[in-house]
Image (cartoon, helix red, strand yellow):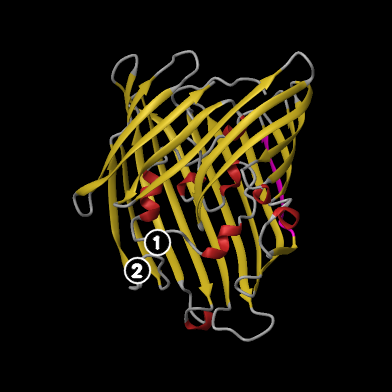
């Protein structure tokens, strides 16, 4: 893939859906994880999605997939007293004289089920610079946990691209596990993403399908089932005078259940999840300074049979956030990018991981992020961003945040 130069106005700060990382397909395939059946690893509060938004400086992604570019791109910050929010992408692909390449990718992030890592080692065939075929493996010490990812990429001279992937999760599980547990229907993920570049606009999209999976947990005596579908679409339009409009939408639908085939059990359950997110952003110079006005809408609904027999939602979030950002130059290497966030949220959580008390809360939220940006390299565009945030609705420290953008 050809290298891309970034202007200060167009730096793609780790892309979108790091906002919530619910439909994380903007950053590559999102395969099934067996840990999903354990439930969410952390609890959301009223401020959770605002925290993640403020730790991702520019919510609308560019069409160039960072997860396929050599470099380290990431953000990390304190989302609450005992938890960090981390979203990090790292890749290094090495091409040889022969038409082959070898590579490494690491991803650390979170979704609506919890934190996770992917560490992929890959080899592939690349006869030309505009397409490649590869196989990547997420390899650990336990062979039962190994994933295989088959991938094809096509790049076009105008900046368009097309990616297709097939992921076999826990591909050797049944033959390599020491336990009596077995997949009765093995997990399979289908992924397709692409972008079309026009003269002054770009359209990009992804779809990630985790086909129905069945896992027989012999220890619990339960048959666990899971399936999940997510998709997103993004449109960007440039106008005269360095003005740009960006619109991005994404959604996720998933369901899972646990059944005891041999007997009725109070441990049986069923979960259905729906998530939708819409982002809009307008960028234009104001007083010769790059300025952006953005909006994010979130809607999360989960029905769980362990609460009210799934007649009422066990998790519900309805949120709207607006933000205003301006870029100011301090000197050749430092920039100041203050951002103000204001929004309203109405949230409810009945089944909590770390508390017996349900969450029922709503109210106005506001936050300011100073965002001091240190340019590390003029040639590559590498930078480090320091972001000590302040919550204005209660006048408390909003968590420290560090962001990196380091092309290799």
**Image x and y of residue 288, in percent:** 35, 23
Q: Label 2's element?
A: loop
Label 1 residue SS: loop
Is 150 on the left or on the right of 85, as rendered?
right
Residue 118, percent from left and from top:
58, 42
Tell me the number on the disc at residue 355: 2
Residue plotted at (64% across, 55% down): 32
Q: Label 1 belongs to which residue?
A: 43
Q: Is residue 101 left or right of residue 302?
A: right
Residue occupying the far left of the picture: 395
Residue 156 x, y percent position in the rendering = 73, 27
The furthest residue to the front: 178
Q: CA distance from mark 1 to mark 2?
A: 8 Å
Is 327 included in the stretch rendered in magenta?
Answer: no
| Nearer to us in this view, 161 or 129 | 129
Badge 2 density bin: few <14, some 14–19, many ≥20, Cα 10 Å: few
Q: Which residues are magenta?
A: 186-196
Q: Tell me, yes or no, whether the two marked residues, 1 and 2, touch with CB atoms within 8 Å.
A: yes
Report the quarter where the N terminus lies: top right
Q: Is residue 159 above or below residue 147?
A: above
Of residues 57 and 325, the one drawn nearer to the viewer in this rendering: 57
């Amino acid at each position: 893939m050809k290298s891309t130069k970034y202007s200060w106005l167009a730096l793609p700060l780790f892309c979108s859906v790091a906002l919530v990382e619910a439909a994380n397909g903007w950053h590559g395939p999102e395969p099934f994880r067996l840990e999903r059946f354990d439930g969410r690893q952390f609890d959301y509060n009223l401020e959770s999605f605002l925290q993640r938004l403020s730790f991702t400086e520019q919510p609308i992604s560019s069409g160039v997939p960072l997860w396929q570019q050599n470099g380290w791109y990431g953000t990390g910050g304190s989302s609450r007293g005992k938890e960090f929010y981390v979203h990090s992408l790292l890749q290094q692909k090495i091409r040889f004289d022969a038409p082959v390449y070898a590579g490494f990718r690491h991803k650390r992030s979170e979704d609506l089920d919890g934190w996770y890592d992917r560490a992929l080692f890959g080899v592939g065939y690349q006869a030309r610079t505009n397409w490649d075929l590869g196989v990547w493996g997420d390899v650990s010490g336990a062979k039962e946990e190994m994933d295989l990812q088959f991938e094809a990429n096509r790049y076009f001279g105008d900046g368009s691209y097309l990616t297709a992937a097939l992921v076999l999760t826990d591909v050797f599980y049944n033959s390599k596990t020491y336990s009596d547990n077995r997949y009765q229907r093995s997990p399979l993920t289908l992924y397709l993403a692409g972008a079309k570049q026009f003269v002054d606009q770009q359209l990009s999209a992804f779809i990630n399908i985790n086909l129905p999976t069945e896992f027989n947990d012999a220890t619990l005596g339960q048959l666990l089932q899971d399936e999940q579908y997510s998709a997103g679409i993004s449109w960007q339009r440039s106008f005269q005078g360095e003005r740009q409009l960006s619109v991005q939408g994404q959604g996720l639908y998933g369901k899972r259940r646990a059944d005891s085939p041999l007997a009725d059990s109070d441990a049986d359950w069923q979960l259905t999840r729906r998530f939708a997110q819409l982002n809009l952003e307008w960028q234009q110079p104001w007083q010769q300074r790059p300025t952006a006005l953005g909006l994010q809408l979130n809607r999360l609904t989960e029905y769980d049979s362990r609460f009210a027999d799934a007649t009422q939602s066990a998790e519900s979030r309805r949120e709207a956030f607006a933000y205003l950002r301006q870029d100011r130059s301090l000197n050749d290497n430092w920039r100041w990018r203050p951002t103000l966030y204001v929004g309203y949220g109405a949230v409810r959580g009945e089944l909590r991981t770390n508390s017996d008390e349900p969450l029922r809360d709503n109210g106005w939220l506001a936050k300011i992020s100073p965002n001091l940006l240190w340019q590390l390299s003029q040639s590559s565009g590498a930078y480090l961003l320091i972001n000590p945030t302040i919550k204005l609705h209660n006048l408390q420290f909003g968590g420290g945040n560090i962001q990196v953008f380091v092309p290799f």
